[in-house]
Image (tube, rainbow, N blue to C red):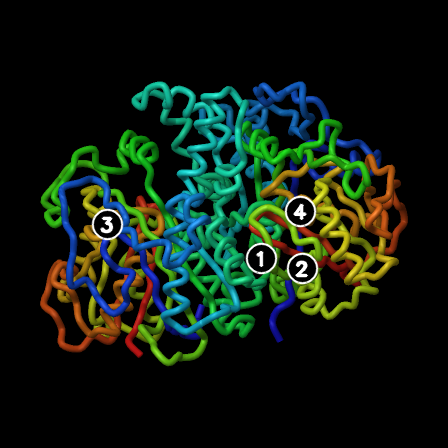
Amino acid sequence: MMMKPIYITGLGNISPQKTWDNSHFLEEVEFGETNYLRCKDPNYKEYIAGDMVRRMSRIIKMGIAAGKICLTDSDCTMPDAIITGTGLGCIEDTEKFLTNMIRNNEEFLTPTSFIQSTHNTVSSQIALLLKCHNYNFTYVHRGFSFESALLDSIIRLGSGESKTVLLGSTDEMTPNTLAILQRLGQYKRKAVRTQHLLKDQSRGAIAGEGAAFFLVSSTPGSKNYARIDALDTFYKPDPESIPLRITEFLKRSGKTIDDVSMVLMGINGDPANDKVYDDVTNRLFSEKPLGWFKHLCGEYQTASSFGLWLASMILINNRVPETVLLKGIKTSELNSILIYNHYRNLNHSLMLVSSV
Amino acid sequence: MPQRVYITGIGMISSIGNDTGAALTSLIEEKSGIGEITLLDTVLKDKYPLAEVKLSNEELLEIIGNSGKTNFTRTALLGMVAAREALNASGIEIPGKYKTGLISATTVGGMDRSENFYKEFLADPSKGHLIDIVNHDCADSTERIADFLGITGFMTTISTACSSSANSIMLGAQLIKAGFLDRVVAGGTDSVTKFTLNGFNTLMILDKNGCRPFDENRAGLTLGEGAAYVVLESEELVKAGNKKVLAELKGYGNANDAYHQTASSPEGTGAYLAMNSALQLSGLNPGDIDYINVHGTGTQNNDLSEGVALQKIFGEKPPPFSSTKSYTGHTLGAAGALEAVISVLSINHGMLFPNLRFETPMKELGITPFTKVIMRADVQNILSNSFGFGGNNSTLIFSKMNG
């Protein structure tokens, strides 16, 4: 599908790095020895009333704060739509209700955690705070969660039904979920030094979480971080077909590999997962500067949204932070960035973003 | 002009039947699926009724032709049964040369098995069968259905509480109109779980006697389970294939009540806005609507709020309306799609299905649902409402194909 390009006119990002202040761009990066990168908390009381803050689980606070930062950043008071993606939704509230239900044998339960366990809680809470009666959708499809929300935004902006969309992603990690996903081999059991993540060959990815929001608009705003030119998703691909899918994707947007200034990949420290990226790099991008980001935010279902935030910040600042560049040399001019991410080799996605 | 979007196949499984044929029989015979709990293992067993699909997971596996040991969740199994029926009814072949997508909705995902896992896991974090937790997330059922049907293209999952599968159908239409897809299998699936039953119990909105939508003495909803899907195809494809069309999806709208996380506003703001935007898109006037399949959960709050919104749109004399949740229970993430399938059945069979167990009109409203099957009805346009937590309100409008 040929899409009408859309513009990113605001950002709000709560992540394991200090990313909530858009006037700074990864000048300080925190590394540590861990297997789970936890979000840095801003002062949530700046964004949410004190009595409400106490009742909210972390993911709701992260989502509301990121959403509000984004709206303020773009000077938008009422978006025409709120569209979010989340892999596991409000997992802390879900676990809380489930645990109480089992421990108390279905008795003496209170509704708060059940109410807040609903997957669309964050997008609804933002609507409630803004008194926003507009279109409100939440996607919950693993590594397609954020991409589906982005696709919906592209379609609505393209058809003219919306002029502005508050697009976002939220995922949180909890001790129980981490323990379960470690047993399933998806996340590392032992702590690793995160800046040397790729030297560690143990099974599983480094776990992470985050809430990233974007104000996307059909026309350029007063400030434009980047333009999104194209999006594609593909499911359980035959490994041999991936390079062709990528070149076809670029071709549909009237581009070739030469037009791409840099590639950002979702390398996550799990050798089996990262092999997919290695193959693509060797076959298509051996000459390209290659960047990565999951040593900063960890792996989670909507981590590609951190990738889109990073690409947007690189383009508007015309600067690639040292720690992001994995291979190749910095080009002086950054016009166009390709983001390639896959979630457990099930859900693959491509996003092409350009400077405005 | 954007493409028109047509429905060429429907499929459903619920407490009133394992396919659309069986459901139609129950609807005509005014046979509700609400009854005593027979399958769900819960301490609330004798306290509340449920609208269960009266088949064990093993029996569901047999229906999909799988006799081996699998780790499918009940949510996925129900989805596979209904999605396959819809696909077969539409006669489309996969793979084919057209861009085919799958959009599925669910609210509980694989919770039916997670509950078992957590029991052991909480006692000892190294315990609990991983096979019971690996399918917890909402996308699992969607990918199982896609793999089962052979759909490899676009797929996604929506979870906006009780309006989820109405939103699947709405997204499907938008993607076809934008030219992103040619055809879409869209709907939703949810199984009953202890998690949801206990959740609604804490909210004190479960009716011990089975839900009585729009009745003065209504005491809450009754949970149900099921799955339903429609096949949406573009005008171009329908014309090229000279295909039989079951209905046109003429209008849709989503709006947010922005009033409270669980309660609906007394003015029915979100409901009004959703109905209004669907009507606008369809180009129809309220007077063109022949039947309203209301959300009608049977809770004090919903029915009053929805009733007020209905009166705002349709005045004191609305077209016949009913809540078919009095048959199927409230199937949460499957509800919008189930009611879409029932609406398509009404259009094709010229019958309207009543609001069971209604006795006493609500004091605050001047309108009442109908209580007996209406046969030989000339049904041109149906409006269907689905409202959810978080103030997520959706309306779909289905129209008969003429000529």
Measured Cα–Cα span from mark 2 to mark 3: 49 Å
Left or right placement of residue A202 versus residue A124 in this view = left
Amino acid carrying label 2: it is: Thr
Q: Measuring 32% from the left and 67% from the top, which residue is drawn there?
A: A352
Left or right placement of residue B18 versus residue A277 in this view = right
Q: Earlier in the sequence, mark 4 or mark 2?
A: 4
Residue B10 numbered mark, or none: 4
Q: Element under label 2?
A: helix
**Frontmost residue, A27 versus B136:** A27
Q: Which callout, 2 or 3, points to the residue nearer the camera?
A: 2
Q: Position of residue B208 (x, y in %)?
A: 72, 27
Q: Are marks 3 and 4 on the same chain?
A: no
Classify mark 4: residues with Cα within 10 Å, few (<14), some (14-19) or many (20+). many
**Frontmost residue, A118 versus B396:** A118
The residue to which callout 3 is attached is A276
Amino acid carrying label 3: it is: Val
Asked if the residues shown at circle 4 and circle 1 are in contact, with their CB atoms under 8 angstroms apart, the answer is no
Measured Cα–Cα span from mark 4 to mark 1: 33 Å
Residue B269 numbered mark, or none: 2
Q: Measuring 53% from the left and 72% from the top, which residue is drawn there?
A: A159
A162 in relation to B186, above or below: below
- The chain holding disc 3 is A
The residue to which callout 1 is attached is B258
Measured Cα–Cα span from mark 1 to mark 3: 43 Å
Q: Element under label 1?
A: loop
Q: Earlier in the sequence, mark 4 or mark 1?
A: 4
Q: Earlier in the sequence, mark 2 or mark 1?
A: 1
Question: Does residue B91 appear in this view?
Answer: no
Q: Are marks 2 and 1 on the same chain?
A: yes
Asked if the residues shown at circle 1 and circle 3 are in contact, with their CB atoms under 8 angstroms apart, the answer is no
Q: Are marks 4 and 2 on the same chain?
A: yes
Q: Residue furthest front?
A: A50
